[in-house]
Amino acid sequence: MKPAAFEFARAGSIADATRLLAETTDTARVVAGAQSLGPMLNLRLAQPRLLIDVTGIPDLTRVEDTADTLTIGACITTANIEDQCVPLRGLEALPPIAMQIAYRAVRNRGTVGGSVCHADPAADWVSALCALGAECLIAGPTGGRRMPVEEFVIGAYETTLASGEILEAIRLPRLSANGRLGFYKVCRKAGEFAFAIGAVLNDPERGQLRLVIGATGGRPIVIADAHGLRNPDGQLDQEALARLMEARGIRSRVDRRQKVAAVERAYKQATS
């Protein structure tokens, strides 16, 4: 199939993009790499009247490096992360995650911000950023606001972006010297969407043990303090984790087993 007819506008600034979004309410979509939106347009699952290209906005590709955080513009691509084009001090786990996403041609154009805004339950970046405790910087007609990625994504393909708002950047906290991020996904073959995702942040210096279960069919399951899910020997309590998943709506035993396996692999990466 081919997309339904639409108009096209190229925004020159964030203010320009938010103005166009506010003027067209729910009939406009922002487009950057188009690796997620493009197929939806072709299948007519999305039929916007206006596409707003934001790839030429300098603020959306900015990088801010501080001692404690890394802020990347929403249009930074997955390939930029894979190729370490941004300062990854304390975030060295990100390039290997990027390398597992789709294929190089997709990573060359697909943006980190676009993945978060698309909010696919099986998206790697959503789970990884939730584990890190990253936050979204949002711009709108009345000003800016910020919120954690885990609150920004509210369901399958749903976010808290209001009319006229655009994701401007993502701020990632850097880990301490001994901090580790583990990430593992279960899929049929490399590059495909996952059946199960496990992401674990272990930063003993800061007393952090965050655990994320992704590919749930909705928003990721985030356990901000997962210390209670460990056995006395420091290993992950698989039965407790499976019970937690069942209580959060993961009814299939096979699905739970896949996700427990993914989380356990991620936990071992983060604690080894």
Image: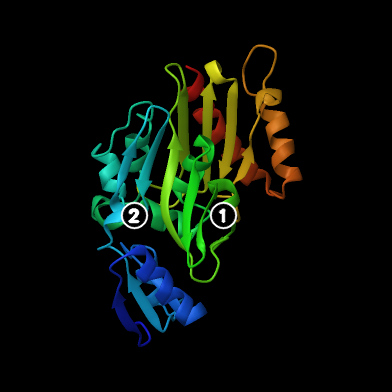
Q: Quadrant of residue 86?
A: top left
Looking at this view, name the residue that lies furthest to the bottom: 5
At horizontal 36% and vertical 76% (from top left) the residue drawn is: 51
* Mark 1 or 2, nearer chain start: 2
| Position of 256 relative to 225 (above/below) | below
Please say if 271 is above or below 183.
above
Q: Nearer the viewer, residue 271 or 136?
A: 136
Q: Looking at the picture, which amino acid does disc 1 mark?
A: Val
Picture disc at residue 111: 2
Q: Looking at the image, is 259 positioned above or below residue 123?
A: above
Q: Amino acid at mark 2?
A: Thr
Residue 144: x, y in percent? 49, 56
**Mark number displayed over residue 153:** 1
* Side of 271 where 96 appears, left or right: left
| Residue 28 location, quadrant | bottom left
Write the residue at 60% across / 50% down: 151
